[in-house]
Amino acid sequence: MVDTARPDVAGRNALYETTTLGDKPVSRTLDILKIAPTPFFSDYGCHVRILEETMALLKWGIRVHICTYRAGRDIAGIDIRRALGMPWGNGVKVGSSKRKIIFDAWLALRSLSVSLQVKPDIVHAHLHEGALIGLPLSRLWRVPLIFDFQGSLTSEMLDHNFLHRASLLYGPLRYLETIIDHKATAIITSSRNAADVLIGEFGCDPDKIFPVPDGVDPDRFRPKWEVGDEQKVALRRELNIPPDRKVVVFLGLLAEYQGISYLLRAASIICGRRPDVHFLLMGYPGQLRYLNLARSLGIEDHVTLPGRICYELAPLYLSLGDVAVSPKVSETEGNGKLLNYMAAGLPTVTFKTPVSREILGDLGVYAELGDSVDLANCLDELLTDEEGATELGRALRGRVLKHFVWKHAVRQILEIYENVANA
């Protein structure tokens, strides 16, 4: 737990005179109670959004208190309040899990305890479980509930094969999801596509939905051409990647809804055409499963699965890439890894989904959804056209600097805070 950076609550109503939001001053400091029903920090997905969002808010003088599960990695300078755990283990598998019901109960108690200490001005909840926990707290303190929407709850359960549409639980869970969506004071989405889902599928009021895209810290994720050659050579040697091979990088969860099986099948096609390609697939938890798949496809010598990569080291690992790939098949969740690829100056191939198009625009290279052959062709095209791939990577770096940096996104969040706090 990181308590050393927690500011004195007694000064919570001090004037915030020097910081402005556009032409509109931020009238006072705010205490934000963030509820994160996940083992924060775990180096992937929504954890990155919570972390970067929090760090950006702290730079503006906003006080943020994160309530989360017992497990997870502490981050220096961030006030993390962990719930109680279980004596037999506190790990939670990625995605939906029955164990999360118990952890969410502990998290609800911890969130109540923290709210009694900090008396929040706003409850900012991540994921549907967080919004469900945050709803009574927002009522208790008569403060707004901001729901940071990462994707449909039931759609995620379907993606993870935790639930089937024919299940008796599907209808009640879909109804509960709708109730949670409607009870929030305001909803922040990571994409316009997610906003469309909330309006079209769940009937939410468009006036309370605010798309705030995922961002990236371009000073941390420097372009690959600015990373020292000595560092790259040493890391390649450590990972046993032959020096004469071009490298395709993936960084994220190793799971089916991330399209890893499609990617490995595409890799087998490419390796059958040319032996000078290597696939660096970084992430967890499915390393052994996908190593076995690579072995069965006969490409084990062309695939490296180093496991979980510490977020702080991600820029260095990405700098090894000639091309980046994200074959995610979920059509409702965000895809923040694309921004890291872009900031690193990597030409990027994805499946053709609304979220990917929203992020990459005309600079993305798109394969047909679920088509390993087309995915292989797109990757091969970039690997062959080195000059074109380099130009594309530089253009993507420019796009991310213009549209997807956290210093811009946090201004939107502050404006939402200010509007709902004064409503």
Image: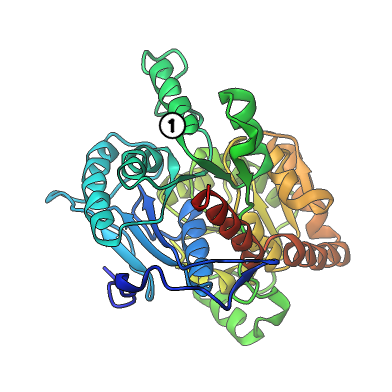
The residue at the far left in this view is 87
Quarter of the image for the N terminus: give it.
bottom left
From the top left corner, tell me how far across and down residue 141 is, in percent: 32, 48
Total labels: the figure holds 1
Residue positioned 49% across, 50% down in the render: 253
Mark 1, residue position: 180
Q: Amino acid at mark 1?
A: Ile
Seen in the picture, residue 103 relative to 178 is either above or below; the reply is below
Residue positioned 60% across, 47% down in the render: 190
Residue positioned 82% across, 52% down in the render: 381
Is residue 20 shown left or right of residue 294? Answer: right
Q: Quadrant of residue 407?
A: bottom right
Seen in the picture, residue 127 relative to 23 is either above or below; the reply is above
Seen in the picture, residue 422 relative to 73 is either above or below; the reply is above
Residue positioned 53% across, 70% down in the render: 240
Nearest the eye: 373 or 62: 62
From the top left corner, tell me how far across and down residue 124 is, in percent: 44, 51
Is residue 309 shown left or right of residue 376? Answer: left
Are there few (<14), some (14-19), or many (20+) residues within 10 Å of tag 1? some
Nearest the eye: 88 or 405: 405
From the top left corner, tell me how far across and down residue 140 is, in percent: 30, 43
